[in-house]
Image (cartoon, coloured by chain):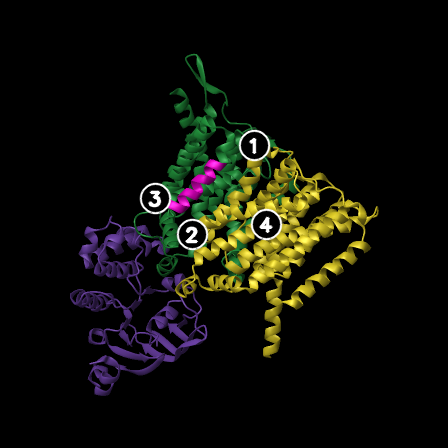
Amino acid sequence: MSGLAVTRLNVSHGAIHALHDITFSVEPGQLAAVIGSNGAGKTTLLRTLSGLKDASSGAAQWENREMLGVKPEDLVRRGISHVSEGKSVIPELTVKENLVLGGIWRGDKADTAQAIEEVVELFPRLGERMSQSADTLSGGERQMLAIGRALVSRPKLLLLDEPSLGLAPLVIEQIFQTVDHLRHKLGLTVVLVEQNAMSALEIADIGIIINLGHVVATGKAKELIDDPALRAAYLGY
Amino acid sequence: MQKVIETLLIGLTTGSIYALMSLALVLVWRSTRVINFAQAGQAMFATYIGFEISSRSGIFWLGLLFAIVGGALLGAGVDYFFMRVLFKHANTGPAAVVAPVIATLGLLGLIRSVVGLTWGGEFKTIEAPASTDGYTIGSTTIPFSALNALIIITVSIILIGLALLFQRTNLGLALRASAYAPEIAKLAGIRTAQTRTIGWAIAGGVGGVAGMLVTSNNFLSPYSLDLLLVFGFIAAVIGGLESMVGAVIGALVLGIGLTFILNYVGTSLVFIGGFTVLILVLLIKPDGIMAKGKGRRA
Amino acid sequence: MRKKIAFFILLGWALLIIGDRVDELRVYQGAQIAMYTIALASIVLLTGYSGQVSLGNGAMMAVGGYSAALTLNNLQTPIWFAFLMAILVSACFGSLLGAAAARLSGPYLAGTTLALAVGLPAIANQFSFLGGEPGLLFDVGFPPERFGEEFTQYKWFFWIASVIALLALFITSNILQSRFGRTWRAIRGNSLAAELAGIHSSRMKVLAFTISSALAGLAGAVLAMTISLVAPGAYSLTLSFALVTGAVLAGVSSLPGVVLGGAILVAIPEIADALAGRFGNADSLNNYLPGLITSVLLILSVIYTPNGPGENLRKHLRKKHAH
């Protein structure tokens, strides 16, 4: 199994046990949607996977190598990019600088320029605003920039935290379409954390439903959508 | 009128040296959220190295080069061997907030004693690289000298170099990103801990230049840079602590303002003037003159 | 309350006895310890309780010292009145500084007070009525004759300093146990929550600054007494620096610790002297060894026991209890 495998992962915030024995796996090229309500532990899960937070026990492997205990900047070098919650761009920098940032670690200026061109092709709106400060972008544009910055790192595994947060329905639709398009085009493995369960499951291969720090259901996305009990209990419709 | 221009020119010289110290403080503040009081000590140590080299070789610029390198190495060392350990240990309890500040104060004392033990307390002088006699225009001699001009030019070159480094290079981008948003920088693959150490090294080198320049028309002692630290801090506060451009502008304003007080009122009010400016800025515009309407991250 | 008064009287009596049994140098050092005790109490009250950091206590001590000297020299008042003026004037300065400081957060406050510590003593150089570099005389006079001929000048210093220190500690400990002390701790813990609970945190901070400065000013006057003069050199950055070290070593939030902190500050030059003697008494050793010891102690304690050795001990005991 060379994709992502999370085994009995436990994470605490001080005295609060935030994640209990989380276990799931994602095959290479698959899109996994992690669904759950506010405070279920979705963001904690992603932050642990990308090295921002320490786990208290368990294992998480990417391409058969341990991820836990590795610094975020080293995980980037192993092809893991995390787009953190809340449009993770640096407002003090220009759009172009935000994009370049994702490529610095590779030390290959030509390839970074190439990667930026690909991002601009994907998000033409960013291309028009390259020298503006990221502060001036709209919410949707910021999310595109955050994803774009992650793509410049040329990831194999993309961890996306609530890309739809605070965006208008039309923009959300567009972001999800882009994510879907991207992973087919680039063969990305994606872990998508979402409250917006329906939209996320629609583009996902598998779904993982988390409630109060426990995995309550995993399975093919289609099956989860069709399970009436789950729909009522966790998907909220 | 002539006195006004003279005062402006001298103030510009003073201000440009303050600018280096205030930049050094701002660089460290942005990356580490600590006002590095040890900066005075680091700069002093670097200046003593510069003093040794320039007095043995007779070449000021060689001394300056060594002061820069020495200051940079010391700055990096302080971050790597001192601040990292500090942040690992002192992170709980009532003293956690004040621990870093107090620690840099302790470091200032440590460097001062080591310098005092090594070089003794007597005043040293560094031979100025240019004439300290004022220029003569027509029949009058003004206090502005070739050395003053050289100081302004040297500082300008360093400022331009820093601006290019920060705006045009990937290292500069990494330094800025790590300062503004360390978490996002890490997720983008930047090694922020190393980047921070590089920031400390740059600050240390810049501080070394400030020490050498200030000493080129003054004396050097284990205490001689304390006032430079205070004025550098005031300048940085005027600029808002976050902005490098603000630090430079704040320093020039302060340098020129204090020179006007010196020339028109007298030496006795220079420090009081500086301190009053500090209090006024903090009370009226605590985010500094460069702040935009919005509040800044703390 | 009555217990506490009894304790302080007992402490005073013990000091009296000790003062009679030890030699002149120790008596003098006793006076110094008393002086440092007051100064450290001023830092503990400010930093340990209200959570504000001031690096400028040396400057506040200078204010107190100069006020006392000016009062005594120009108005020919009794000594106690000079000490009282030291308290009042520095309290005024303190409330002004506090009004500015209440709006400042950590780094700004630290930098501002450091600027004061560097600059204020230097200002004394610039004004002739402050006596310039050599400073002003501060002579509290000979001990009263009824104490007999055996009663030395140093013992007189020691008595005055001890009485003042005991009074200061008594009052400070009462303030810290009063409503004010609790409020300060609440603000230090969480100033937003305190604000929501209806506490005027900025007013309380100004009050903390005022009382702390009054204590520092008093310590400054006691220092002036022990060296019989006030001069810029006596209130240098080195003094502020030593005080911060003493406070950290004492545990910034422990009032009883300040006596220990004071003793350490007096012991450091003594130890440095002994060491310097062993290494040949070079000038630079005599001048810089105390500073070296102080800074190493400060750095080590701030890294390993930032809240004072006392806290580590308490933690250790708590852990033992738990097992």
Residue lying farthest to the right in this orientation: C149
Q: CA distance from mark 1 to mark 3?
A: 36 Å
Q: Disc 3 to disc 4, how far (Cα)?
A: 36 Å
Q: Residues within 10 Å of mark 4 (few under 14, many from 20)?
A: many
Q: Nearer the viewer, residue B227 or C150?
A: C150
Is residue A232 visible to us here? Answer: yes
Number of numbered discs on residues = 4
Q: Given the image, on which type of amino acid does mark 1 rest?
A: Phe
The answer to whether the residue labelled 1 contacts the one labelled 2, judged by CB atoms less than 8 Å apart, is no
Q: Dot 3 lies on which element?
A: loop
Residue topped by disc 1: C127
Q: Are marks 3 and 2 in contact (CB under 8 Å)?
A: no
Tell me the CA gap for discs 1 and 4: 22 Å
- The circle drawn on residue B290 is 3
Q: Are marks 2 and 4 on the same chain?
A: yes
Q: Chain C in the picture: what colour?
A: yellow
Graded by Cα atoms within 10 Å as few (under 14), some (14 to 19) or many (20 or more), the crowding at tag 2 reads some
Q: Which residue is mark 4?
A: C216
- The residue under the point 39% across, 43% down is B239
Question: At label 2, which amino acid type do we have?
Answer: Arg
Badge 4 marks a residue whose secondary structure is helix
Circle 3 marks a residue in which chain? B
Q: Which residues are magenta?
A: B272-284
Distance from the alpha carbon under mark 2 to that under mark 4:
22 Å
